[in-house]
Amino acid sequence: MFLSNYLWSVKDGVPEWYAVALVSGWALINNDAVATYSWRERQGYTLMSEDAKATAATRLLAGAYKLSTAQDNIDYYRDFAKIYDEQFADGMGYMYPQVLVSAYRSYAKPDDLPVLDIGCGTGLVGAMLELPSDQIDGVDVSQEMLDAAQQKSIYGTLHRVDLTTDAADVPTRYGAVVSAGTFTFGHLGPEVLPQLLSLGRQSTLYCIGVNSEHFGQQGFSTVLDAMVQAGQISAPVFEERRIYQTSASEHADDTATILIYRKLTD
Ligand SMILES: C[S@@+](CC[C@H](N)C(=O)[O-])C[C@H]1O[C@@H](n2cnc3c(N)ncnc32)[C@H](O)[C@@H]1O
């Protein structure tokens, strides 16, 4: 914020919006872009072109892809939470929650409830599901992302859980388990899939979105094959969907592979 305050104090003769846009642009293109998000920066953000917004959002995504551990995620999303919806989701034209929920609706039966949202973040998937709050819970490792979701009053219970260790504190017997944006670079890998089974009952529907490149690189097929061979899940259906609407990002053509299967054992 030092540069922000400096510019603010010397902007005599400079149109106010220009100084604001400059500060905001500076904040967004730095690695600690998410450290603060003041009213002034929000005003500056709204003045940016669509291409500049996509560029800023792409940098936020690049930062997320560089994460490695659960603690990295906790640290990164602490500040990202404040700007996630506006500067990442809107900036990229993020439509992953919509496509995930569309897949869920294609396969769900009326009694595939309640739903558990894995890596629920600020609650974009929950918002798309439009369920009564007693029919949807969420889990996430970031308290700040959970706080952002809580403010929307979408979920019944939000659990702070590191899914790379265990989910023992999360209630079981959900009718559906869904996820968007969390099985991707720097976040969760295929080794987490088997432990998600403990959260469901027999026939629970799983709709798990996985970044398609991550899917190919991280051996998701091997883990899924083993679960099928062990009689734990039905043969998965794979649906490939675009993640972003923007054309102004190197990630414009990224896709998600949505894994759809049912738990076979109880
Ligand atoms: C890209 S966001 C997706 C959020 C939301 N599902 C959406 O589509 O907007 C990824 C989320 O995964 C969560 N996450 C990352 N690592 C995790 C872990 N080990 N356990 C639980 N959640 C994790 C992050 O905190 C973050 O909220």
Image: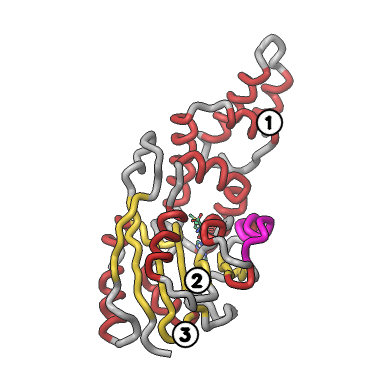
- State the residue lying farthest toward the right: 9
* Residue corresponding to mark 2: 163
Q: State how far apart marks 1 and 2 are (Cα).
A: 36 Å
Q: Is residue 265 above or below residue 74?
A: below
Q: Nearer the viewer, residue 258 or 75?
A: 258
SS at circle 3: strand
Task: Kindly report the distance in space between the C-alpha atoms of the residues bearing marks 1 and 3.
Answer: 49 Å
Residue at horizontal 44 percent and vertical 57 percent from the top? 181
Residue under circle 3? 201
Q: Amino acid at mark 3?
A: Arg
Image: magenta residue range: 145-155
What amino acid type is highlighted by mark number 1?
A: Arg
Query: x and y percent of residue 60 in the render?
Result: 49, 44
- Please tell me in which quadrant of the rendered image residue 120 appears: bottom right
Q: On the image, which quarter does residue 44 sit in?
A: top right
In three-dimensional space, the C-alpha distance between marks 2 and 3, rounded to whole angstroms, equals 19 Å
Say if disc 2 is inside 8 Å of ligand 1.
Answer: yes
Q: Earlier in the sequence, mark 2 or mark 3?
A: 2
Q: Residue furthest top?
A: 13
Which of discs 1 and 3 lies nearer the camera? The answer is 3
**Rendered position, 183 above or below 39:** below
Q: Are marks 1 and 2 in contact (CB under 8 Å)?
A: no
Location of mark 1 (residue): 40
Residue type at numbered disc 2:
Leu
Residue 244 x/y as whole percent: 40, 45
Viewer-proximal residue among 154 and 77:
154
Residue 147 in magenta? yes
Indicate whether residue 68 is drawn in magenta. Answer: no
